[in-house]
Amino acid sequence: MEEAIFQAFSRQSRVVKALTISFPSGYHPNVTDSAATNLQPGFFAEEIETMPREMLETIQLQRLQTIVRRLRDHVPVMAERLAGIGDPASLDDLTRYPFLKKEDLRNNYPFGLFASPRADLARIHASSGTSGKPTVVGYTAEDVRIWSECVARCLRGAGIEPGWWLHNAYGYGLFTGGLGLHGGAEMAGIGVIPISGGNTERQLMLIEDFAPEAICCTPSYALTLAEHLAERHKKSPMQVGILGAEPWTDSMRSAIEAQLGMIAVNIYGLSEVIGPGVSCETAHRDGLVIMEDHFLPEVVDPETGEPLPDGEVGVLVLTSLTKQAFPVLRYWTGDLCSIRRDPSPCGRTHARMSAIVGRADDMLVIRGVNVYPSQVEHTLLTIKGASPHFQLVVTREGNLDTLMVRCEHDGTGGPPEVIQAAVVAALTSALGITATVSIHEPGSVPRSEGGKLSRTLDQRNLA
Ligand code: DLL
């Protein structure tokens, strides 16, 4: 059926593309001294990426109906939540369903929201949760294939050509960054250097020796690599960076592009929805194109949950349309952005989102790792002599985010140095990143004075 709709529209899609190919006015690449200036978006699945919106929305509705049925039939918790709400007859009916939130994943840890039996799973990933337990997500082999296809579209759209090499410095493992980019690159015929994160000296050596045309890592790590290359008076061979997993600004983009002589493209995603590749900028860098045939976006008011018009900033809510093992209906990402639905200059018709401008909750993203203040509180409560009063200070030193935890001793646990060492060890293990810890006298960390107490001082100036 989908195939028939696709055929009917495919001639029309070529016309739409021809009409919208002009370049946006006011767009000026920052890179002036490298081949990167000439990069143009390519396509991995051109007919899908440029299909008329009418056709896209027909496919979205069919897939939404299938996903709702799948949740009812295979996830008892969801069947209960959806009881009494009929199947969607139009995309507008989406708003009749409740949001799915991070706490729902936590309450159903580890596999309560899976829609496929254990034996059908090809892969598990996870990201840090708020109570020490991670958020677990699963993929069938078909889910992994679709994920790779989404990432392949991102990489080709960013101007990376088949036959180029990609230095993949996202972490491999339970984090979705490394393996997510890896699968997409392989599918697009791009060679992968699977270096993973860390060991900067080795990364620099391999960049010099292997001369990859492209790199993927967090934006803060791209700047670290740039600084090291500058110290050594080395030029980067890279023409494109696929950067994401943490918030970054346009000024950071300018610095990265100027220092590395490449274009820096923003990629977005989250493990709950699939991982990297939910959306990505093209080489034009004019909004992150959402893979809308797989993920249905909404932007809603953070307070009321009511849908907001295109162009207004609110919470991004995503529905997965094709995932088998871990479908999500109206997942509340907590990420703030706006969306637009006009076709992009390269002919892509899928909606585009702005860069993430902040978070609606208290989650911090530090060096690509999600950190919740409640994780810190939970950890402090396990250490004898430490009180649960604390403050988090996040700064950006050089290009790296640094987390400082100010907390108090309660007078029962021995010398402050001993408590400090215990807190450092426990936090490293709970958060997955190292924090600087300072121990203070009881009563010295700010207390709530009736209103909300902000335990977090984010001094990174991400706005
Ligand atoms: O960070 C997936 C990813 C890997 C994306 C590599 C891009 C590149 P999680 O660990 O589940 O997944 O963290 C998801 O990170 O809700 C955002 O708050 C933040 N985030 C991800 N990409 C961006 C971005 C991966 N481009 C959480 N800009 C999300 C701003 C981002 N924040």
Image (spheres, rainbow, N blue to C red):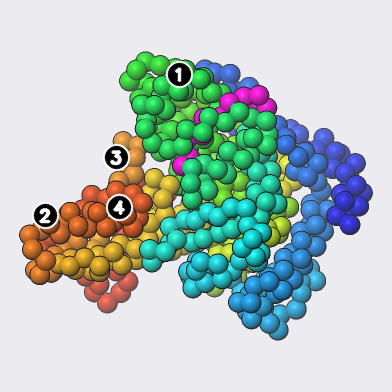
Do the residues bearing badges 4 and 3 touch, measured as CB atoms within 8 Å? no
Q: Dot 1: what SS?
A: helix
- How many angstroms separate mark 3 from mark 2 (CA)? 25 Å
Q: Magenta segment: does it hold 30?
A: no
- Residue range of the region highlighted in magenta in the rendering: 159-171
The numbered mark, 3 or 2, whose residue comes first in the sequence reads 3
Q: Can you tell which quarter of the image residue 450 is in?
A: bottom left
The numbered mark, 1 or 4, whose residue comes first in the sequence reads 1
- How many angstroms separate mark 4 from mark 3 (CA)? 19 Å
User: Main SS type for the magenta part?
Assistant: loop
Q: Mark 3 points at which residue?
A: 397
The residue at 79%/53% (across/down) is 56
Q: Mark 2 points at which residue?
A: 417
- How many angstroms separate mark 1 from mark 4 (CA)? 32 Å
Q: Mark 1 points at which residue?
A: 208
| Numbered tag placed on residue 428 in the rendering | 4
